[in-house]
Amino acid sequence: MHHTKYLIIGSSHAGLSALDAIRLQDKDGSLTLVTQESCLPYSPTILPYVLSGQARPEKVFLRDQQSLDSLSIAFKPGTKIVAVEGRSRQVVLQSGEKMEYEKLLLATGAAPNRPPVQGLEAVPHHVLRTLEDALTLRSKIRKNATAVVLGAGLIGLHAAENLARGGMRVIVVEALSQVLPGYFDEEASQMIHRAFSDNGVKILLNKKVSRVKGAEGRPL
Ligand SMILES: Cc1cc2nc3c(=O)[nH]c(=O)nc-3n(C[C@H](O)[C@H](O)[C@H](O)COP(=O)(O)OP(=O)(O)OC[C@H]3O[C@@H](n4cnc5c(N)ncnc54)[C@H](O)[C@@H]3O)c2cc1C
């Protein structure tokens, strides 16, 4: 069974910061970094630009294998942890294998919250959280087709901007009375709203999507 002094689950910002901090204190202790994703560590913040092609997918990585090797990190992509057995200090992988650890860090981040919209599960739709999500969404971009983005928060507007750059007609639906609620005051939000409108993105405020229906016979 694989045994490691430090086990970090999740290879994004939190996992990488922890890894660097551990290596400042302990240069040699065995350290294993696992992620369920199949690629090198990357920053989700760049993903909207992968959509429009402004960022090339091969340029999004935060570390390469060489830099992980130089810190003696056992990096294990494609490794999903499905259970933690705290008493025996073991984790269970999706494959059924186990790993033994001395210290464990869960740096597993967050998952997109799908709103309770009637019909959503029956309609093809996307979220933007992983590199795979970004590449899938990018492959669906069609010039002059319409994309509806639910939510005018940071990720919604980033996605809207880059779908529009990709040539799509974009409509953003926001339940609250301004874009980027919680980030900016009304005046700044209005300026941002105008910049989007000037670039052809339609934003509907005070509107809550309650139901979605797929166009029959037309794959999305
Ligand atoms: C599209 C987008 C744009 C963003 N833009 C900005 C921005 O401009 N500015 C900003 O400050 N923030 C931005 N953010 C937020 C920022 O990316 C997050 O705050 C940050 O990535 C959180 O880092 P994290 O390491 O905690 O978690 P995450 O980045 O979520 O990483 C968690 C990792 O753990 C892995 N994992 C989860 N469960 C398991 C498991 N069971 N087994 C193995 N691996 C697992 C996941 O696959 C993932 O790789 C953006 C986020 C997104 C999605």
Image: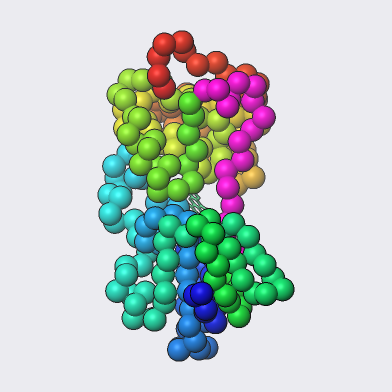
Q: Quadrant of residue 200?
A: top left
Residue occupying image coordinates x 49% and y 75% = 2
x and y percent of residue 171 in the render? 48, 24
> Residue 127 at x, y = what percent?
50, 38
Colour scheme used in the picture? rainbow
Instruction: In the displayed orientation, state which residue is furthest to the right.
Output: 87
Nearest the viewer among 54 and 206 is: 54
Q: Does the magenta stretch include residue 47?
A: no
Q: Is residue 119 magenta?
A: yes
- Quick check: 59 above or below 173? below
Query: In the rendered image of this protein, does residue 117 appear above or below residue 14?
Result: above
Residue 122 location, quadrant: top right
The residue at 45%/48% (across/down) is: 130
Instruction: Name the residue furthest top.
Output: 216
Any part of residue 69 in sight = yes
> In the rendered view, does 95 fall on the left or right side of 140?
right
In-image side of 69 versus 197 (left or right): left
At x 72%, y 73%, the residue is 87
Query: Chief secondary structure of the magenta span?
Result: loop
Q: In which quarter of the image is residue 9?
A: bottom right
Q: Is residue 207 visible?
A: no
Instruction: Measuring from the top left, give residue 194's x and y in whole percent.
Output: 47, 31
Residue depicted at 43% across the width and 57% down the height: 78
Q: Give residue 161's position: percent from left, percent from top.
A: 41, 36
Query: Which span of residues is magenta-colored?
Result: 106-123
Q: In this view, does 198 lie above or below 57?
A: above
